[in-house]
Image: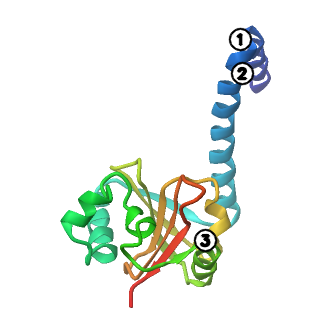
Amino acid sequence: MSFSMYRQEINQMIDSLPDEELVKVYWSIEVIRQKYLFSKNMLDKGVVILTLLEKEHRIKELWDSSFAKNISDETKSEIHYNQYKWHIFSYKKQDCFENEAARNEFDAMTKNEVYVMYQDLPDIVFEYNNANEIVASDFDYEQDIYVFDKNFTWTYVHTHEAMCGPYFYKQV
């Protein structure tokens, strides 16, 4: 099927839906569009994205042991850490930069090679190479994303909640 045929068929499907269903269509397309724009932006910046499927659990364990090492299991349970790791910042259990200060700190970091993980993708971690050009605004439409250096000395977190974050934490 050619692209024009896809477009024609999509238009026919949309035309067959009642108006109240169009909001669902809109948001579905918007998600696809934002993912496309994100990928295109990374590609335009020369970022090489690798999907790590074999050592993702170890990397996530290192994130936990590096950035939440001083948080007790009891506190983690109280703040629902397993639901969202970034609760260590939103519940003020870990000192960090927030909002614009977090964005500025992240933008100032050297980022040639970084790891990227999403809260809702438990079995995948990404490695971004040639990533020095990435900035906080690149992640504005991403949800519950954690960007951190390969030495686990700093992390930047952009959440799904407008009133929470972003956060930047750097080991002392």
Q: Image quadrant of residue 23?
A: top right
Q: Give residue 128's position: percent from left, percent from top.
A: 51, 66
Give whichever of 159, 120 is nearer the camera.
Answer: 159
Residue drawn 48% across and 55% down?
A: 144
Question: Is the residue 143 above or below the residue 12 in the image?
Answer: below
Give the mark nearest the N terminus, 3 or 2: 2
Q: Give residue 31's position: percent from left, percent from top.
A: 63, 40
Residue under numbered circle 1: 17
Residue drawn 25% across and 66% down?
A: 75
Question: Is the residue 142 above or below the residue 46 in the image?
Answer: above
- Image quarter where the C terminus lies is bottom left
Residue under numbered circle 2: 22
Is residue 1 in view?
A: no
Residue contact at pointers 2 and 1, CB within 8 angstroms? yes
Distance between mark 3 and mark 2 Cα atoms: 34 Å
For the residue carrying disc 1, how many other residues have a C-alpha within 10 Å: few (<14), some (14-19), or many (20+)?
A: few
Q: Give residue 78's position: percent from left, percent from top.
A: 27, 59
Residue under numbered circle 3: 99
Give whichever of 31, 53 is nearer the camera.
Answer: 31
Give the residue type that dot 2 points to.
Leu
User: Disc 1 vs disc 3: which is toward the camera?
Assistant: 3
The number of discs equals 3
Distance between mark 1 and mark 3 Cα atoms: 40 Å
Residue contact at pointers 1 and 3, CB within 8 angstroms? no
Residue drawn 80% across and 23% down?
A: 4
Q: Return the mark for residue 120.
A: none
